[in-house]
Image: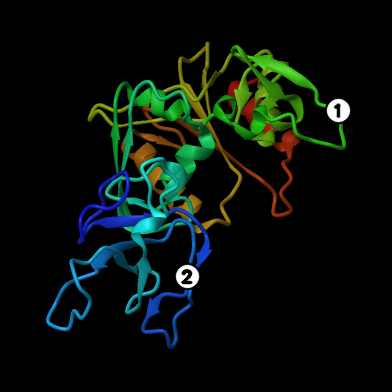
């Protein structure tokens, strides 16, 4: 058929369905769901004027086979499309993060321009979890900007004042308003990622220990990591890196941590100490709690307090 809709969809195009709808015109009918969900992706496979074409004129409508319903083709009529919008199908050679929600792909390419004012921690999480095998990121600008998207102050959820049972308690942080109950702030006033990190940061602050939170640690080969806390012993000059583990029961989290430990060892950093520094590892208890007294005792031992 001739190009259909505002985007000129034609035979062979990769498309995405943008509305939940029952669709009765399906072939073959037996075994078909007769329903297409918002976000389903497919390919235009017709109408095709072959030897068995019985109607006069050229094909006018679209027939689509979706990846979730292989072997079935759904008909979309030309009169469902208009120049004013609200087309049931759109081209899907590239998708916004919103439209990719709920979908999975073997390989995804994530393109992040700079600036991108709509991007939040929740959106970047969605973008980076659409792949089954591999994700490739094309990022414009400094890589540090990308890391900042994982912080609490980049969360859209934390800035929502939508609790209908409790009066909101907005606080300003770096020029934005957040719900006080949805962010983790230390006594020193910085935003951290978890309540456990708040406890450790406040413990260090209470002991009068100067620390850096997620300070970049670079290796000679150009690789780098971000320890949770970095301390420098003023007497010996030794660097102490504190890492808190809160989700070791999650397989992907544990694998990431194991790789990080290997990286530390390559830099002569370990729990036994080394030329590169000392690694202090703290963990949540099995019940999800944290023993701040044990952590304080260990810090005092290391620094001779």
**Residue 136 in the image, given as x and y percentages of width and height:** 28, 44
Q: Quadrant of the C terminus?
A: top right
Q: Nearer the viewer, residue 270 or 148?
A: 148
Looking at the image, residue 196 lies above or below residue 234: below
**What element does badge 2 sit on?**
loop
Q: Quadrant of the N terminus?
A: bottom left
**Residue 229 in the image, given as x and y percentages of width and height:** 54, 26
**What element does badge 1 sit on?**
loop
Q: Residue at x 35, y 40 (%)?
A: 263
Question: Which of the marked residues, 1 or 2, is nearer the chain's N terminus?
Answer: 2
Q: Nearer the viewer, residue 270 or 175?
A: 175
**Residue 122 in the image, given as x and y percentages of width and height:** 53, 39
Q: Is residue 137 left or right of residue 118?
A: left
**Quarter of the figure with residue 188:** top right
Q: Is residue 261 left or right of residue 219?
A: right
Work out how far the residue at label 1 is from the one at label 2, CA to CA, in angstroms: 45 Å
Coloration mode: rainbow
**Quarter of the figure with residue 114:** top left
Q: Is residue 37 left or right of residue 7?
A: right
* Residue identified by numbered label 2: 23
Q: Which residue, as the protein is rendered here, is positioned at the far bottom?
A: 30
* Front label number (1 vs 2): 2
Number of marks drawn: 2
The numbered mark at residue 108 is none
Q: Residue at x 45, y 38 (%)?
A: 124
* Dot 1 crowding, Cα within 10 Å, few <14, some 14–19, many 20+: few
* Residue identified by numbered label 1: 167
**Residue 196 in the image, given as x and y percentages of width and height:** 67, 36
Is residue 132 at least partly visible in the picture?
no
Looking at the image, residue 276 lies above or below residue 124: above
């Amino acid at each position: 058929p001739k190009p259909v809709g505002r985007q000129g969809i034609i035979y062979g195009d990769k498309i995405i369905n943008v509305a939940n709808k029952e669709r009765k015109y399906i072939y073959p009918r037996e075994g078909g769901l007769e329903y297409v969900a918002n976000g389903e992706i497919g390919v235009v496979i017709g109408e095709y004027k072959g030897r068995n074409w019985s109607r006069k004129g050229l094909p006018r409508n679209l027939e689509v086979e979706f990846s979730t319903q292989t072997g079935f083709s759904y008909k979309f009529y030309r009169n469902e499309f208009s120049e004013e919008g609200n087309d049931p199908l759109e081209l899907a050679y590239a998708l916004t993060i919103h439209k990719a929600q709920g979908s999975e792909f073997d390989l995804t390419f994530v393109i992040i321009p700079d600036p991108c004012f709509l991007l939040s921690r929740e959106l970047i999480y969605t973008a980076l979890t659409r792949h089954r095998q591999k994700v490739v990121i094309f990022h414009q600008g400094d890589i540090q900007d990308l890391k900042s998207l994982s912080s609490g102050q980049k969360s859209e959820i934390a800035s929502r004042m939508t609790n209908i049972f409790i009066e909101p308690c907005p606080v300003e942080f770096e020029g934005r308003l957040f719900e006080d109950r949805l962010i983790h702030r230390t006594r020193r006033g910085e935003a951290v990622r978890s309540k456990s990190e708040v406890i450790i940061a406040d413990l260090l602050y209470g002991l009068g220990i100067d620390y850096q939170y997620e300070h970049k640690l670079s290796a000679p080969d150009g690789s780098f990591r971000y320890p949770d806390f970095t301390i420098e012993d003023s007497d010996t000059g030794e660097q102490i890196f504190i890492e808190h583990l809160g989700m070791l029961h999650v397989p992907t989290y544990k694998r990431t941590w194991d790789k990080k430990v290997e990286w530390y060892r390559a830099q002569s950093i370990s729990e036994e100490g080394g030329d590169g520094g000392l690694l202090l590892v703290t963990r949540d208890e099995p019940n999800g709690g944290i023993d701040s007294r044990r952590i304080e005792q260990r810090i005092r031992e290391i620094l001779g307090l």
